[in-house]
Amino acid sequence: MKLLQYLLALCLFGLLLAGTSLAAPAVEKPAACQVCGMDRNAFASSRTVITYSDKSAVGTCSINCAYNDAAAKKSLKIVLLQVADHDTRKLIDAKKAFWVVGGKELGVMSGTAKWAFAEKKRAEAFVGSQGGQLAGFEAAWKAAAH
């Protein structure tokens, strides 16, 4: 019996050491938000990637940090803003996303949550369970300004 407990403990210890292989896959670089320094892997469901007119790209943890970066770089035009789908964590075009502003689920870097969804039905289901309001990109971007 003690041998079985020892082997079980050894297996659990091995799993803890190899925990990174059980974790969700890492997001695209950079690993840290280029505005606030937060871990983009930990906030994979709200992260963004901004591509500017000078072909530079900035990775952030949230639309709030994306807004702050864009505000600091007024001379550059945003060519593409990608945001993570809340549920799948895949990057989607922020302007084509179905946004939910507000609700019970805490936001990232903001008192007002802003979540993006690739599908309207999933955004509506989120509103049904977590509250908030369906919105377009412009409303989400405006809310990120505050």
Image (cartoon, rainbow, N blue to C red):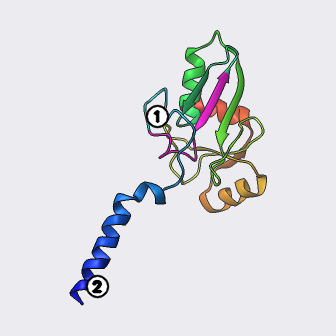
Q: In this view, does 95 lie to the left or right of 2?
A: right
Specify the quadrant that holds the C terminus: top right
Mark 2 Cα shell of 10 Å, populated few (<14), some (14-19), many (≥20): few
Q: Residue at x 66, y 13 (%)?
A: 76
Earlier-in-chain disc, 1 versus 2:
2
Q: Does the magenta stretch include residue 44?
A: yes
Q: Which residue is drawn at 54% across and 24% down?
A: 68
Element marked by disc 2: helix
The residue nearer to you, when weighing 109 against 13, is 13
The residue nearer to you, when weighing 16 against 97, is 16
Range of magenta residues = 39-51
Q: In this view, does 139 lie to the left or right of 146?
A: right
Q: In this view, does 90 lie above or below 128?
A: above
> x and y percent of residue 133 in the render?
68, 48
User: In this figure, which residue is indicated by the disc labeled 1?
Assistant: 32
User: Which amino acid type is shown beneath numbered disc 1?
Assistant: Ala
The residue nearer to you, when weighing 103 against 22, is 22
Q: In this view, does 25 lie above or below 77?
A: below
What is the quadrant of residue 138 in the picture?
top right
Residue 88 bears which disc, if any?
Answer: none
Closer to us: mark 1 or mark 2? 2
User: In this figure, which residue is indicated by the disc labeled 2?
Assistant: 4
